[in-house]
Amino acid sequence: MSKAMAQQLAMSRRERKLSLQQDVDHLKRKLLKEKNIHRALERAFTRPLGCLPRLPPYLRLYTSELLAEVALLEEEVARLEEQVVCFRQKLLICQEETTPTAKKKKKKKIV
């Protein structure tokens, strides 16, 4: 192998190595961004009710809007669930109030 070919081969290897290193750096940045997005989504879905999620600025606008909408819908669902519990309690109270009266009327008719 001639000296010129050896130099060309060495240069080609360096260029490939540099290109691969750039690819690795790009993928590391992309992975870090994905991890940050994952953490932000995790925080948004594990937040306590009553407080809106703090969304980082690097999320896409569409994603931020969807997360905010999900947070509002979760609040509405929680409110409606509380209403259902309240209505059930009121219904039970009404049933308890009317049931003994009906039993008393039946006893009076028998006597």
Image (cartoon, helix red, strand yellow):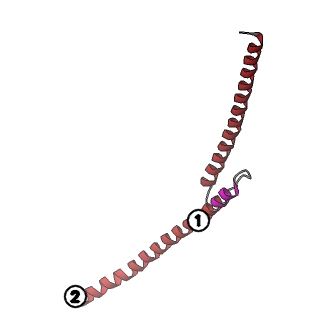
Q: Residue 5 placed where, x, y %?
A: 74, 14
The residues tagged by marks 2 and 1 sit, at their Cα atoms, a distance apart of 55 Å
Most prominent secondary structure in the magenta stretch? helix
Three-letter amino acid code of the residue under disc 1: Leu
The span picked out in magenta is 60-66
Q: Amino acid at mark 2?
A: Ile
Q: Are marks 2 and 1 in contact (CB under 8 Å)?
A: no
The disc at residue 34 is none
**63 magenta-colored:** yes
- Residue 99 x %, y %: 35, 80
Residue annotated with mark 1: 73
- Determine crowd level at label 1: few under 14, some 14-19, many 20+ residues with C-alpha closer than 10 A: few
Residue situated in front as seen by the camera: 24 or 81: 24
How packed mark 2 is, by other alpha carbons closer than 10 Å (few <14, some 14-19, many 20 or more), is few
Which comes before the other along the chain, label 2 or label 1?
A: 1
Q: Position of residue 26 (x, y in %)?
A: 71, 36
Taking the spot 62% from the left edge, 56% from the top edge, the residue there is 48
The residue carrying mark 2 is 110
